[in-house]
Every structure is written in structure tokens, then in C-alpha cells.
Image: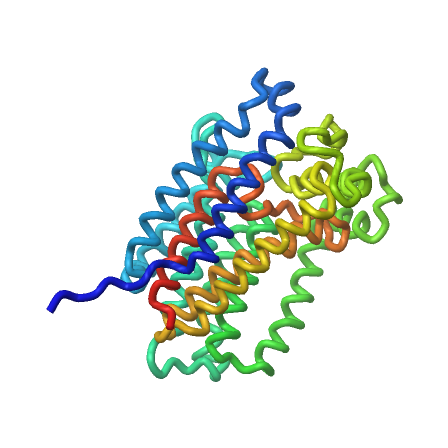
Amino acid sequence: MKQSRPPSPDLWLFACIIGLLAIGIVMVYSAGAVLAFREYGDSYYFVKRQLLFAGLGLAAMWFTASTDYRVWRKYAKPLLLICFVLLVAVLIPGIGVVRGGARSWLGIGSFGIQPSEFMKLGIILFLASWLSRPGYPIKSFLHGLLPPLGLAGLAFGIIMMQPDLGTGTVMMGASMIIIFTAGASMKHLGLLGLCGAAGFAALVVAAPYRLKRITAFLDPWSDPLGAGYQIIQSLYAIGPGGLAGLGLGMSRQKYSYVPEPQTDFIFSILAEELGFIGGLTVILLFFILVWRGMRTALTIPDTFGSLLAVGIVGMVAVQVVINIGVVIGLMPVTGITLPLISYGGSSLTLMLTALGILLNISRFAR
């Protein structure tokens, strides 16, 4: 008897991914054209590269969406090992490339990859595989919770040596969501939360530039030309946008006011040009993506698929909340891109690859 094919992926999920990607490509051109012309003499510099990486990412998404998600369980350990090797290689002088004050890139010239981005997916795959083993003692602190947490902490420590607090925070956030979903004790997680808050405070105090970001977040106008500059300029972009915006391409803040407007602060340019309606549309698309992803996680029949879906959705949700929170002044500046919207090769390719896995999981959901 011929085996029936699984149904099509969740079309709502797929439509949200493509919609956000299309909005991102338009906004990368609109937000980055001025900077691209000034730096490279080509207004299309950023959008051409974004289209290239979008093509690579869509090819990767098609591959992972067509591949049975259960296959990744077998490759979770070697993929994680490769991610660790690349993370360590970044730290070696002469191999790792410094950009934006962080040694977090591998590559030549303007082309490179950011291993910390791929570690996010690597740790999600491994934790989903590890914690879904039958009879895993997740309620035990020493034998159940500490090993996966220690592994994620090791990856976080290496990422912080670059340093890249934003990517490390997203990775740890997704890891904790998986561990919580796997059934860890709330008492253990509460104690770890207190320890994590103390550790985060220590990291902030240990680096003067992070402390400046915190003080700038609390009162950006105390240092308007220094640590508070990005937040102030972002708010100056969002405010005039009003309900319908100034019009696509009509942003004033992208003219050397908002730093790198095509990356971390692209949402502020989007809100300036497309207004509250445009910003709300993007947020609703992310909300639907997270909702359909969680629906998939709740209805998939096996634990590995459920934890894997939760981890991928958690990664997207944490990154969106932090990025938009920073842009509207609710969080300190951390240097995190907006998934599928911001300019960036490694982040875009990784995100589309991960969402392809989520699409495949949705094919098997009840």
C-alpha cells in the first residue's frame, strides 16, 4: 500500500513568514538607501545583498520544510559540536573578524558569517533532542536541570567573550523556554532566575559601555549625544509617523540621525514612514506567527517535535520583544536585529532555516 504524504504546512504560518520577509526587503532598501549611497556609492547596496541572502534563506527554508523534522534528532549532537568549534574559532586572532566592536564574525572582507547566530538553532535542536528522551529526570536539579543549563551557559559564556550580549540573551531565553516546557521545577527555575538576574547585573557593571546603556535607558536625555543618542533619535523617528506615516521612503531620521537604520533600528524607520498602521501590521504578523507556531507545538504528537517547535517560536518571540522594546525605549540598547525585517545575512539565513523546520513540524500536527 502506498504511504500517504503528510498534509501541507500551516499556510497561515507560511504567509506570515513571506509577508514579513517582503516587508523587510522593502524596508531595508528604504531605510538603508541613504547610508548605502554615502558609504558605497550605490543606493541598492544593502537591498541587493539582502535579496541574495533572502534567496539563500528561502532555499534553506524549502530544504528544511521538505525534510522530516525527526531527522534532525540524529544530527543534533554533531551540529552543536560544529557550532562550538566555530564559536571558539571566532576568538582566535587572525581568524575572527571584528565588526562593531565585537569579534563575532568569520569571513573575508564584507562577506562573513556570525557563528553565534547559528548557535541559537544548534542549542535548540540539541536541547529538544536531549530533554525529549523517555524518562529524562527533568525534575531533578543535579541530574536533570543542571546539565542542559550548564551546556547553554557554556555557549553563552563563549558568546560573551566576543562580546555579544544580545545574541547570547536570545539564545538563553529560547533555552529556558525549552527547559520550562520540558517540565522543569518552578522552584528551581525561580532560584535560577534570581541567580541569572544577579549575573546579568554583574555583566553590566563589569563593562562600562553596558552600564552607560542602562543609565541611558532610564534617562536618555542625560547624555543626548552619547549613550542616549540612539534611543532619542529612534523616538524622534517614531513620533512624527503618527497614524499613517510620512510615506514610504520619506523618513527624515535615516539621513545620518538613526545609526545603522537598516539593522537594529529598522522598526523606528518603518514606524516613521508607515506610521502606527504599518508598525501594528508588522506586530500582528509576528503575533500570528507565534500563535500558529505554538499551536503546532501543542498539537504535534511527539515530545521532540513539540520542544523543537517551542524553541524556534521562543527564539523568534524573544528577539522581537527585545528589538521592538529597545526601539520604543522600553529596554536598554542590546544590538539585536528584528527577525526577517532587519538587514543581515547570517541572521536572515538562520531564521528562514529554523522557520522551515517549524513549517515541516506543522505538517504533522493534528
**Left or right: 257 as drawn, with respect to 281:** right
Q: Residue, x 54% and y 64% (percent of image)?
A: 291
Q: In terms of image quadrants, where is residue 287?
A: bottom right
204 with respect to 86 (left or right): right
**Front residue of this view, candidates 316 and 30:** 30
Query: What residue is drawn where x is 54% and y is 36%?
Result: 25
Q: Residue furthest right?
A: 222
- Residue 89 placement, left or right of 193: left
Count of numbered circles in the view:
0
Q: Find residue 352 and report its horizontal and vertical position in percent.
A: 44, 48
Q: Position of residue 301 (x, y in %)?
A: 36, 75
Q: Quadrant of residue 30?
A: top right
Say which residue appears at 48% left-offset and 74% top-offset: 146
**Is residue 328 or residue 131 the one in the foreground?**
328
Residue 188 lies, in percent from the top left, at 57, 80
The image quarter containing residue 128 is bottom left
> Please, is residue 194 above or below residue 100 in the view?
below
Q: What residue is rendered at 58% in x and 30% in y?
A: 29
Residue 169 appears in view:
no
Query: Is 5 placed left or right of 356 in the picture?
Result: left
Quadrant where the C terminus lies?
Answer: bottom left
Q: Position of residue 255 (x, y in %)?
A: 73, 26
**Whether residue 68 is visible:** yes
Q: Is residue 322 above or below residue 258?
A: below
Q: Which of the pair 317/133 is nearer the observer?
A: 317
Specify the quadrant that holds the N terminus: bottom left
